[in-house]
């Protein structure tokens, strides 16, 4: 197999003659020559203009791919000094309701409870969809200050120290993902999903989006 300028994990199978839309000089070009036949690409990547099919996919297959959507979920991780933890470590979750913005850093989950990462000072907050796109598009410092403002509003500014570590992924911007998990939009039918998962001659499609029972989960992949 020949695969130029792409170091991502591969299944080891692809269909000869199918290639990306990128120019051969581009670093993101993909070109395979192999008699195998499996494609395990994230749904959003297949929906994007970063991959083209030659010959083009039939209409029923193209619509099968386009009828589904990608959800985006972002977990934002913070670590505080273990001797300055300000939340009740016996709680599994606590919630925040912003007076004006829906889904603004709404769900916090401590990770330092007994039996997990005890006395680690770790906690994360979850955002999804529109709020995920906001935080993934902005810099770390802006996001960190937004999260700290919520925590200080909840627990008191004098009780919340500066975090010693901070990080979060940006799934919607990753060129191999463009999202976190596949999602069935309203009105989606089983026939549409069958078209999504169906093979096209010797070209087979795999991944969590093709699972009828566990779509959206790692187990579905």
Image (spheres, rainbow, N blue to C red):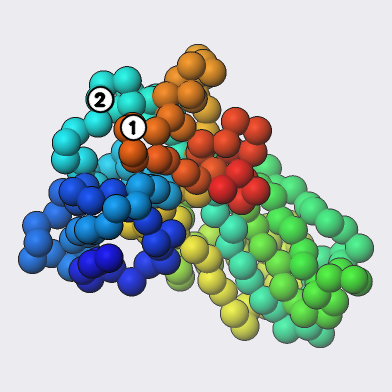
Q: Position of residue 98 (x, y in %)?
A: 62, 43
Q: Is residue 215 above or below residue 91?
A: above
- Residue 196 lies left or right of residue 161; in this view the side is left
Residue at (74% x, 58% y) in the render: 109
* Contact? badges 2 and 1 (CB < 8 Å): yes
**How far apart are the alpha carbons under marks 2 and 1?**
8 Å
Q: Secondary structure at mark 1?
A: loop
Q: Is residue 56 above or below residue 67?
A: below
- Nearest the viewer among 28 and 186 is 28
Report the residue marked by disc 2.
Answer: 58
Residue at (19% x, 33% y) in the render: 56
Q: Is residue 130 above or below residue 88?
A: above
- Residue 39 lies left or right of residue 184; in this view the side is left
Q: Is residue 74 visible?
A: yes
Q: Position of residue 180 (x, y in %)?
A: 50, 49
- Nearest the viewer among 79 and 35 is 35
Q: Which mark is residue 200?
A: 1
Q: Position of residue 219 (x, y in %)?
A: 65, 48
Q: Position of residue 160 (x, y in %)?
A: 71, 72
- Residue 151 lies left or right of residue 176; in this view the side is right
């Amino acid at each position: 197999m020949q695969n130029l300028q792409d170091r991502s994990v591969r299944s080891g199978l692809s269909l000869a003659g199918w290639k990306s839309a990128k120019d051969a000089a581009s670093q993101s070009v993909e070109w395979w020559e192999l008699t195998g036949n499996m494609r395990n690409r994230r749904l959003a990547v297949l929906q994007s203009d970063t991959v083209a099919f030659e010959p083009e996919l039939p209409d029923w297959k193209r619509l099968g791919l386009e009828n589904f959507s990608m959800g985006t979920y972002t977990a934002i991780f913070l670590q505080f000094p273990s001797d300055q933890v300000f939340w009740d470590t016996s709680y599994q979750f606590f919630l925040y309701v912003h007076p004006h913005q829906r889904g603004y850093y709404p769900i916090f989950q401590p990770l330092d409870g007994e039996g997990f990462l005890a006395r680690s000072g770790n906690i994360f907050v979850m955002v999804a969809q529109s709020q995920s796109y906001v935080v993934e598009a902005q810099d770390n410092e802006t996001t960190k200050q937004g999260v700290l403002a919520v925590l200080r509003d909840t627990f008191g500014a004098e009780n919340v120290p500066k975090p010693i570590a901070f990080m979060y992924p940006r799934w919607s911007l990753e060129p191999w993902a463009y999202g976190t998990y596949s999602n069935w939009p309203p009105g989606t039918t089983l026939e549409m999903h069958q078209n999504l998962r169906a093979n096209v001659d010797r070209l087979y499609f795999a991944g969590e989006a093709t699972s009828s029972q566990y779509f959206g989960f790692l187990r579905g992949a």
